[in-house]
Image (cartoon, rainbow, N blue to C red):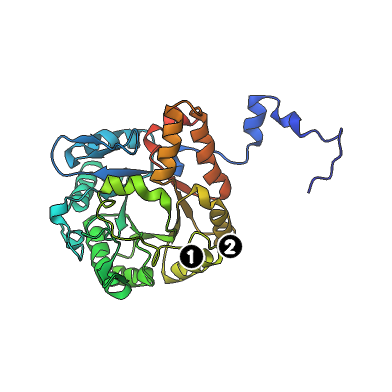
């Protein structure tokens, strides 16, 4: 509560100089606050631009050193791997997710062999990059089967963890999958594998460029509103988080980020658990295009990222994470 009275209290006094503003700043950003998403593609010597996401590329495994060397040099703590899966490898069940020689598994092996534990690896647990219909689970009679999907997600999780994934990130939004995955990890003596639950993942219109990046947008039949959250809901988000914490989640993701700052703050205040925000592809592309067209300047990127931190996010998944030297003051 402010007890002073003008002119005794002048809040502008602390804003007068840069050094003073830095001394009293309530929130700051550093590279340690970021997770860098990386898109993978088959082949050799490939660095492929993604048209809908300016400045973002798909990398063949032999080219991962380019971006990982930079990430480690800049003290980024973790990367998140997402595959662009050939349509020839997709089917109704997303079986390629269980192939120990798939893109993600080979990338994990490459990173662990070359970099050991210099940087963490986060892996998406979901079927949408691998299904011919573009959904995160098994589709039957136009319905996503919850329990049957979980059985595949458990196998996918165990495979990734056994190969060396540090943080499993179930993004599928099936009910009960966190508890089942946690129990399976314990049974296989993979108890130190962390789970970052996409507990709050809304059925959002901001995912389009990402779906282009992993090759699921054209394949997607219908929408994901029967399993991803209704963006009109707040209380439902709190219930989702409470359930996933009880089931064994170590950290919580809110996705998208910017439209849901109120959710981030509420979760942080209520549960005191590490909360991550995903600055999703649609947010990134809108911001990048506006900067590119000089509608706004690049300082807006820093302002945007700071909003996640101010809301309570411990870390931010952002496609800007490999260019922080150009963004952070």
Residue depicted at 28% across the width and 45% down the height:
213
Q: Identify residue for label 2.
A: 270
Residue depicted at 36% across the width and 68% down the height:
174
Label 1 or label 2, whichever comes before in sequence order:
1
Taking 28 as reference, is 35 left or right?
left
Residue 241: image tag: 1
Q: Position of residue 94 (x, y in %)?
A: 20, 62
| Figure check: 200 above or below 60 | below
Q: Secondary structure at mark 1?
A: helix
Q: Secondary structure at mark 2?
A: helix
Work out how far the residue at label 1 is from the one at label 2, CA to CA, in angstroms. 10 Å
Q: Position of residue 99 (x, y in %)?
A: 15, 59
| Figure check: 201 above or below 213 | below
Q: On the image, which quarter does residue 68 sit in?
A: top left
* Front one among 317 and 182: 317
Q: State whether residue 101 appears in this view.
A: no
Q: Are marks 1 and 2 in contact (CB under 8 Å)?
A: yes
Q: Position of residue 204 (x, y in %)?
A: 43, 54
* Front one among 83 and 9: 83
Taking 309 as reference, is 59 left or right?
left
Q: Within 10 angstroms of label 2, few (less than 14), some, or many (20 or more) residues?
A: few
Residue depicted at 49% across the width and 59% down the height:
231
Taking 223 as reference, is 140 left or right?
left
Q: Position of residue 314 (x, y in %)?
A: 49, 49
* Front one among 116 and 240: 240
Q: State whether residue 262 appears in this view.
A: yes
Q: Within 10 angstroms of label 1, few (less than 14), some, or many (20 or more) residues?
A: many
């Amino acid at each position: 509560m402010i007890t002073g009275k003008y002119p005794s209290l002048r809040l502008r006094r602390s804003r007068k100089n840069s050094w003073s503003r830095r001394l009293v700043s309530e929130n700051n950003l550093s590279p340690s606050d970021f997770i860098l998403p990386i898109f993978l593609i088959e082949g050799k010597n490939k660095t492929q631009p993604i048209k809908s996401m300016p400045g973002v590329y798909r990398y063949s495994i032999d080219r991962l050193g380019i971006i990982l060397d930079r990430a480690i040099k800049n003290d980024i703590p973790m990367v998140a791997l997402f595959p662009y899966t050939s349509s020839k490898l997709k089917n109704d069940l997303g079986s390629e997710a269980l192939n120990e020689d798939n893109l993600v598994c080979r990338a994990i092996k490459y990173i662990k062999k070359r970099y050991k534990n210099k940087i963490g690896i986060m892996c998406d647990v979901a079927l949408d990059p691998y299904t011919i219909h573009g959904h995160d689970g098994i589709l039957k009679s136009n319905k996503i089967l919850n329990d049957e999907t979980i059985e595949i997600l458990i196998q996918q999780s165990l495979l990734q963890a056994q190969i060396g994934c540090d943080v499993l990130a179930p993004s599928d939004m099936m009910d009960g999958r966190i508890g089942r995955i946690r129990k399976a990890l314990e049974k296989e003596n993979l108890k130190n594998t962390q789970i970052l639950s996409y507990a709050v993942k809304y059925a959002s219109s901001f995912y389009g460029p990402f779906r282009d990046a992993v090759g699921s947008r054209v394949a997607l039949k219908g929408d994901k509103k029967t399993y991803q959250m209704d963006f009109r809901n707040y209380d439902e988000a709190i219930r989702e988080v409470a359930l996933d914490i009880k089931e064994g989640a170590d950290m919580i993701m809110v996705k998208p980020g910017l439209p849901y700052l109120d959710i981030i703050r509420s979760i942080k205040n209520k549960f005191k658990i590490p909360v991550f925000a995903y600055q999703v592809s649609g947010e990134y592309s809108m911001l990048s295009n506006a900067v590119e067209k000089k509608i706004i300047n690049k300082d807006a990127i820093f302002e945007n990222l700071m909003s996640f931190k101010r809301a309570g996010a411990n870390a931010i998944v952002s496609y800007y994470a490999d260019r922080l030297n150009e963004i952070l003051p």
